[in-house]
Amino acid sequence: MIRNPFISKFEHILRLLMVHYSSGRFPLYIVTEHPKSGGSWFSQILGDYLDVPFPRNQIPPLNSCIMHGHYGYAPRINNPFVIVRDGRDVMISWYYHCFFINDRYNERLVQRMRQALPFSNYDNIEKNLPDFMRYHFEKCKPLGFHWGAFVDNWYGKVPYLVLYERMLADPYAEVSMAIKKVLNVEVNEEKLAGAISKFSFEKLSGRHQGEEKKSSFLRKGIAGDWKNHFSWESKTIFHKYAGDKLVLLGYEPDDSWVLQDRPSCMTNGIKIASEIE
């Protein structure tokens, strides 16, 4: 199903106006992420817990609700929940969303991306990923920004960054901390636990985490999947454009992850910077 482009455009403009100029009036609860970082999952839990609607892929009501999107920082935005995920995993999930039709109205995106990057075999992710990442980081399409820029845009400007990996490990602790820090309120433990249970990966997808379904927006629901797809070239490309953000966010202690499993033809004396320039 392809959504009407005029309705989609109107919805996008209305959301931007509400987020930037009305977030403190209703109030609105802003959830922003780079796509495929867990923002929809977080929004569902938050909406259920706060008893406000989450108008997903539809025109939002002009009252208190969850406003989920891919918004950049602006000081006038109130109550922003910023969701971040390891950018290497984001690249894998974003690749799937860009090139394979799923159940979340991405047909038009798939058409555009397959025209922009006409790979001979879209299933060969390891081969295609380097060119996809170059396109993502250099042209910033189709979003207008890349993962590293999103991190830079929000880092240090909100009271709490929600990490997708912490949500996977302990969703109650992570969502609870986010609510306390962003909204400055205490949490009803029983109510939050109920919301988290209601929107678990298993209940939403009908599968266990790690069981892949390529045609589903909820494809796999795990952390670390990048290790199954990143070649040496993919590692060096990601490091060139956003490796410092992995260290900034605590995903890696330093750059040594790039050197792991490098080809034997690479000499030990070559520095990372030389390998990726």
Image: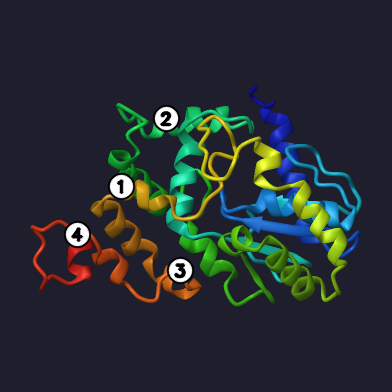
- Where is residue 274 drawn, in percent x and y? 17, 67
Q: Earlier in the sequence, mark 1 or mark 3?
A: 1
The residue lying toward the viewer, choosing from 42 and 70, is: 42
Who's the residue at 54% across and 29% down the image?
A: 215
Question: How far is disc 4 from disc 1 in space, using C-alphas?
Answer: 16 Å
In 3D space, how far apart are the residues under numbered discs 1 and 2 (Cα atoms)? 15 Å
Q: Position of residue 43 (x, y in %)?
A: 74, 52
Q: Could you tell me how far apart the alpha carbons at marks 2 and 4 are, in whole angstroms?
A: 30 Å
User: Which comes sooner in the sequence, label 2 or label 4?
Assistant: 2
Residue under numbered circle 2: 114
Q: Nearer the viewer, residue 149 or 48?
A: 48
Say few, some or many: other residues with alpha carbon within 10 Å of mark 1 (under 14 / 14 to 19 / 20 or more): many
Quadrant of image for the N terminus: top right
- How packed mark 4 is, by other alpha carbons closer than 10 Å (few <14, some 14-19, many 20 or more), is some
Percent position of residue 150, x then y: 54, 61
Q: Are marks 1 and 3 in contact (CB under 8 Å)?
A: no
Kind of element beneath mark 2: helix
Q: Residue furthest top?
A: 1
On screen, residue 172 versus residue 92, left or right, reads right
Callout 1–callout 2 Cβ contact below 8 Å:
no
Q: Which residue is mark 1?
A: 130
**Distance from Cα at disc 3 to Cα at disc 2:** 31 Å
- Dot 3, how many residues are within 10 Å of its Cα: few (below 14), some (14-19), or many (20+)? some
